[in-house]
Amino acid sequence: MVINGKKVQLFALTSNVPLAKEISKYSGIPLSEITVERFADGEINLNIETSVRGNHIFVVQSTNYPANEHLMELLVMIDALKRASAESITILMPYYGYARQDRKAKSRQPITAKLVADLLQTAGANRVISIDLHAGQVQGFFDIPIDNFPAGSFLASYFNDLKLENLVIVSPDHGGVTRARQFSRYFDSPIAIVDKQRPRPNEVEVVDIIGNVEGKTCIMFDDMIDTAYTIIKGAQALKNKGATEIYAAATHGVFSGDALERLQNSCITKVVTTNTIHNERVKNFSKIEVLSMGELLGQTVLNIIKEEPISQVFERFSVKNQP
């Protein structure tokens, strides 16, 4: 397909085909054919079914579970495109796996978020588009352009439509205070903080709630929900402190293990997330609401092709009270 005088192709790898189809529908760029296979020992093999020589390529792939499989699949794809003489390779990675490993918390630990950035660049990627990186500093690990889109506006739009009163935005831990404060500006509401500690891995113990939540409607806001232990324990602590209703919002619904079952049985009224990660099981749980990022990413593709500012995408897909 030719847009703005450029030959453009869009590919979907296996992690999030539904989102790729939404991007395709909005942008008007059809998905090009690709075959992804596994050898008996698990090695990934793929074949691009059409010429990409001289074309500007966009590849949709989140690196969620199984993270290593999806990451390796992406690296193999980038290598194939580079060897097939693609003009440019842009990676649409809504969920950037390994972003939590962005620093050395203990001696002799890796900084795997940097390693992933190095792998993508070495393989041949020219640009990366991601949504709500766990830590903004991950952008500094790249020597190629990387755009980190915040999803707060989408999530805020959902809650604005509910017309909630006596609202308090709650950070599930001290590390998320900045994120919660930015989100609170969409509602002009105060924030509270769940003061927690982890006695052992994957265990959460709430010490106290910092801030007034009695008689309030609370929205716990984070960038991701993985095992859901933090959100659920925090929600129960808010309930014990007198909160009348509790919602949860997060960009990335990782939902590892039986997280969905735990959320469904928790005191949380509704969990709102986006489709950066595809999970077929979500539709079976009434408390989970999934918002689509397809139009935002589709418009981003068009702006890049037309060499228009990415900031225009934020202006188009933002709520009125943007911070």
Image (cartoon, rainbow, N blue to C red):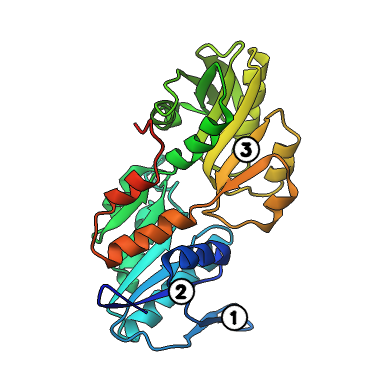
Instruction: Name the residue carrying label 3.
Output: 271
Q: Quadrant of residue 9?
A: bottom left
Amino acid at pointer 1: Arg
Tag in front: 1 or 3:
3
Q: Is residue 282 left or right of residue 221?
A: right
Residue 104 rendering spot, x and y as whole percentages: 38, 44
Quarter of the rendering occupied by the C terminus: top left
Name the one closer to the observer, 292 or 69. 292
Q: Residues within 10 Å of mark 3 (few under 14, many from 20)?
A: many
Q: Residues within 10 Å of mark 2 (few under 14, many from 20)?
A: many
Name the one closer to the observer, 103 or 313. 313
> Counting residues from the N terminus, which is met first, the one under dot 1 or under dot 3?
1
The span from disc 3 to disc 2 (Cα, nearest Å) is: 30 Å
Residue 222 rendering spot, x and y as whole percentages: 50, 36
Quarter of the rendering occupied by the N terminus: bottom left
Instruction: Name the residue carrying label 2.
Output: 11
Q: Residue at x 57, y 23 (%)?
A: 164
Amino acid at pointer 2: Phe
Badge 3 vs badge 2, beta-carbon distance below 8 Å: no
Q: Is residue 306 left or right of residue 180?
A: left
Instruction: Name the residue carrying label 1.
Output: 38
The span from disc 1 to disc 3 (Cα, nearest Å) is: 35 Å
Q: Is residue 227 left or right of residue 48?
A: right
Looking at the rendered structure, the secondary structure element under dot 3 is: strand
Badge 2 vs badge 1, beta-carbon distance below 8 Å: no
Looking at the rendered structure, the secondary structure element under dot 1 is: strand
Q: Residue at x 45, y 26 (%)?
A: 174
